[in-house]
Image (cartoon, rainbow, N blue to C red):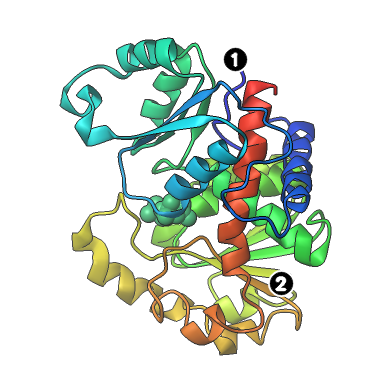
């Protein structure tokens, strides 16, 4: 079974194959209406379940549109409306869904839920975000970087803010695809040390630098994300804002990176908190290309999972 659970557990050659396939599939439908079918229909006859235990705009719409463009059908399910949200086990849910659908994408809280789903499903499972990682996002981000600046290997990526799930998937990608990564943020919000060590062991340079102005020196890409993720308690909001204010991505910070540095944010954003609108809408920003590339990258992921 070919699941897409995380970037650090997927072979680097396979990651490269998926990223390049995403680029090719995007090029193949340039200028077409969004609802037009792809020339190839690799998902014809396939049914895909999209399960959401958390809110979503990009993941939900891009998976749904992607499946339809490739000739398949989708079923968008809210975790709360399923028996899963009322005590049915993940294992039983996985076994039952495997009798109806060919592929499962799940956005959930605990990583354990994803792993259990994958363990008990007879069809491929894709990670649509957990508290711990967001691999589909980073596949789209790598595609976006490379479209604008060429191969990401050897480049310097700087993350400013909370060392959250999206940050961790970037660290996974650094280890697998060979780029340098610097985290800048308060110590209490550092990314998980185990993942930092794992990437370092693969020979890439992973730095932690508390001074954001210093961290972004020589950066090819500056990235941030919300200061309060969906799994964080809202009670943490004020404290986090106080801790993270100094890590806002603004024009002053961007001007300390390379002159042609890109700016990314997976969205949704809290404008003028983690990043100013000046940066988000400015010349460095590729945030909407990232959002678009969710579609193309995930289509390539689904084809890889299904071997079609
Ligand atoms: N970036 C991202 O995953 O967005 P959604 O929460 O809207 O899916
Ligand atoms: N870190 C954010 C990403 C949203 C796409 C969250 O988990 O809420």
User: In the image, which is nearer the foreground, mark 2 or mark 1?
Assistant: 1
**Quick one: quadrant of the N terminus?**
top right
Q: Position of residue 162 (x, y in %)?
A: 44, 62
Of labels 2 and 1, earlier in sequence is 1
Q: In this rendering, would 7 be left or right of 244?
A: right
Vertical comparison of 35 with 46: above or below? below
Q: Circle 2 sits in a helix, a strand or a loop, which is it?
A: loop
Element at label 1: loop
Q: In this view, does 211 lie above or below 58?
A: below
Mark 2, residue position: 219
- Position of residue 42 measured from the top left corner of the image (x, y, whole percent): 67, 28
Number of marks: 2
**Residue at 63%, 78% in the rendered image:** 214
Question: Quarter of the image holding residue 175?
Answer: top right
Horizontal relation, residue 233 to residue 210: left or right: left
Measure the C-alpha gap from mark 2 to mark 1. 38 Å
Apparent side of residue 221 relative to residue 154 in the rendered image (left or right): left
Ligand 2 lies in quarter: bottom left
Q: Nearer the viewer, residue 114 or 82?
A: 82
State whether residue 217 is above or below residue 91.
below
- Name the image quarter holding the C terminus: top right
Residue 138 is at least partly visible in this image: no
The residue tagged 1 is: 1
Could you tell me residue 254's position as x and y percent? 62, 82
């Amino acid at each position: 079974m070919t699941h897409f659970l995380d970037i650090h557990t997927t072979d680097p050659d396979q990651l490269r194959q998926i990223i390049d396939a995403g680029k090719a599939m995007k090029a193949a439908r340039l200028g077409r209406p969004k609802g037009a079918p792809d020339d190839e229909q690799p998902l014809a006859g396939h049914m895909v379940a999209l399960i959401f235990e958390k809110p979503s705009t990009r993941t939900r719409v891009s998976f749904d549109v992607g499946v339809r463009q490739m000739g398949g059908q989708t079923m968008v399910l809210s975790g709360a409306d399923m028996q899963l949200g009322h005590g049915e086990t993940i294992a039983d849910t996985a076994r039952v869904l495997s009798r109806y659908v060919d592929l499962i994408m799940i956005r959930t809280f605990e990583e354990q839920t994803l792993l259990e789903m994958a363990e008990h499903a007879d069809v491929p499972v894709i990670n649509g975000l957990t508290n711990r990682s967001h691999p589909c996002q980073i596949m789209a981000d790598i595609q976006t970087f490379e479209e604008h600046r060429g191969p990401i290997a050897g480049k310097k990526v700087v993350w400013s803010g909370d060392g959250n799930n999206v940050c961790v998937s970037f660290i996974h990608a650094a280890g697998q695809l060979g780029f340098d990564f610097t985290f800048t943020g308060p110590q209490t919000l550092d990314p998980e040390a185990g993942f930092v060590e794992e990437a370092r062991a693969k020979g890439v340079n992973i730095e932690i630098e508390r001074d954001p102005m210093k961290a972004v020196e020589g950066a090819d890409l500056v990235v941030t994300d919300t200061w309060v993720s969906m799994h964080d308690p809202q009670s943490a909001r004020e404290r986090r804002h106080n801790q993270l204010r100094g890590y806002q991505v603004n024009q002053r910070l961007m001007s300390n990176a390379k002159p042609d540095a890109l700016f990314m944010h997976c969205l949704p954003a809290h404008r003028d908190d983690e990043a100013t609108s000046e940066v988000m809408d400015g010349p460095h920003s590729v945030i909407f290309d990232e959002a678009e590339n969710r579609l193309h990258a995930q289509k390539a992921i689904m084809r890889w999972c299904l071997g079609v």
